[in-house]
Amino acid sequence: MTEPSVPLATPLLERHRALGARIVEYAGWLMPVQYAGIMDEHRAVRERAGLFDLGHMGELFVEGPEAGAALAHALVTDPPVLAVGRAHYSMICAPDGGVIDDLIVYRLAEDRFLVVANASNAAIVSDELASRIGGFRSVLDDRALTTGLVAVQGPASAAILGPLTTVDLAGLRYYAIAEGEVAGIPALVARTGYTGEDGFEVFVDTAATISLWDALADAGRPHALVPVGLGARDTLRLEAGMPLYGNELDRGTTPFDAGLGRVVALDREADFVGRAALEAARAAEPTRSLVGLVVHGRGIARHGYPVHAGERRSGVVTSGTMSPTLGVPIAMAYVAPGDAGPGTMLEVEIRGARSAAEVVPLPFYRRPR
Amino acid sequence: MVPSDLRYTKTHEWVRVEGDVATVGISDHAAGELGDIVFVELPGPGRALEQAAPFGVVESVKAVSELYAPVGGEVIEANAALAAKPELVNADPFGAGWMLRVRIGDPGQVEGLLDAAAYEALVAEG
């Protein structure tokens, strides 16, 4: 499938404009990048709560008596091990072990799963899944365009969503999902997110997205809930040490390169796409390691900037920003494995000048419990 | 509304001319477009500036942007407050968020800059 030439929009586009959002085209969608400002939105999610329109994400439902086996063949994880109502982080890899996309897989019923793909890869994943599950008694129902997704993230999330929903949030664990209603709207409510905070993702029919958004915005008012755009979504996930496809992950990267080898379920009998290559990747000496960096010098290390260890080129920055929570420039980078130990001093080349950068453990930020 | 006593560039810098000294900054429009500014890199005193050539960099959370000299001349002073408080550029772009004071080389260059009305028209065009 090719990228549509006319950008798509979620039903909330006019809401975003009315809220003063700056709209950008991202992955073929017109999406809000920021409203009040990335710093304020970021802090709101860390301290209170933020409301996100994630209508651009790709919702792929896989159903049928062999749906679990089909996904176990198509993905690097083993979804049949999930209990009904639970979820896990997963990836779909090419036969050579390169990552096509990273995903969340939810088990909705014995024979029904929801796979959520990144917007930029939703069409590719849909096509790839359809082809890979062809030999199994299962069907793929691509509802990327007919499913709305709104997230509430931050410590006040449960207090905001709780009174609106029939789902028992106290009983809904991290990485769990339940069917119910939110503000009278049939919904899937998941305790997942991409911010490093407690929070929820609510899936509804696209047509109900505006009603859902308005109900959550109203319920959030006493908690000073604010709308949050893609800009703060990126700084939040970076502080939380979560990879972004296109930055830390791509077709030329295996899960082992990204330090996510534990996601690959190799201790099982059945074959799956990419298995041989991933077994080789696990056995091979790593050629690079994904690390966190805190930049001590001036400037921000951004995607693509070189990383040096003395006279030797060590690697490259994959993502970088000024950390709103820590107040220092942070980055993730691929470096030579020998340079990956916490405390190692490296240098990032920022517009021709070198800045000192210290390797630190990921994540940069862990929420207080 | 932008201050009427300043002159502007198409690249969104402003200058305030007092005698042969120009104070340089970026407009509220530019600061707003950049978003939260977290780092400003400026040249030190004595550095020669060439009109329309890059003289520094401003970084927001999201992006890096170059700054272009509205006039040629010699840097007298860079705003030291921006090292610790780059957010002054967002909070007060025409005041405390100023960036450089420059000894103007050729006063004729100032005449070629946009006045407030022309700059507002430029911004309104998008």
Image (cartoon, rainbow, N blue to C red):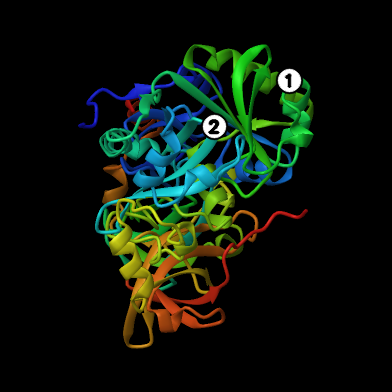
Which chain is mark 2 on?
A: A
Task: Estimate the x, y position of residue A238 in percent, counting from the top left.
Answer: 52, 55
The chain that hosts pointer 1 is A
Nearer to the camera, B124 or A7: A7
Find out whether the residues at labels 2 and 1 contact each other: C-beta distance under 8 Å: no
**Distance of label 2 from label 1 (alpha carbons):** 22 Å
Residue designated by label 2: A110
**Vertical placement of residue A238 versus B8, above or below:** below
- Residue indicated by mark 1: A166
The structure residue drawn at horizontal position 48% and vertical position 66%, both measured from the top left corner, is: B77
Give the quarter of the image for residue A354: bottom left
Q: Position of residue A242 (x, y in %)?
A: 52, 54
Closer mark to the observer between disc 2 and disc 1: 2
Task: State the residue at coordinates (56%, 81%).
Answer: A343
In percent of width and height, residue A164 lies at: 73, 20
Q: Determine whether A189 is above or below A264 in the image.
A: above
Mark 1: few/some/many CA within 10 Å (<14, 14-19, 20+) = some
Residue nearer the viewer, A208 or A53: A208
- Considering every residue shown, the one lying at the far bottom of the view is A311
Residue A225: x, y in percent? 69, 31
Which quarter of the figure is the N terminus of chain A placed in? top left
Q: In the image, A189: left or right of B19?
A: right
Residue A48 is at least partly visible in this image: yes
Element class at badge 2: loop
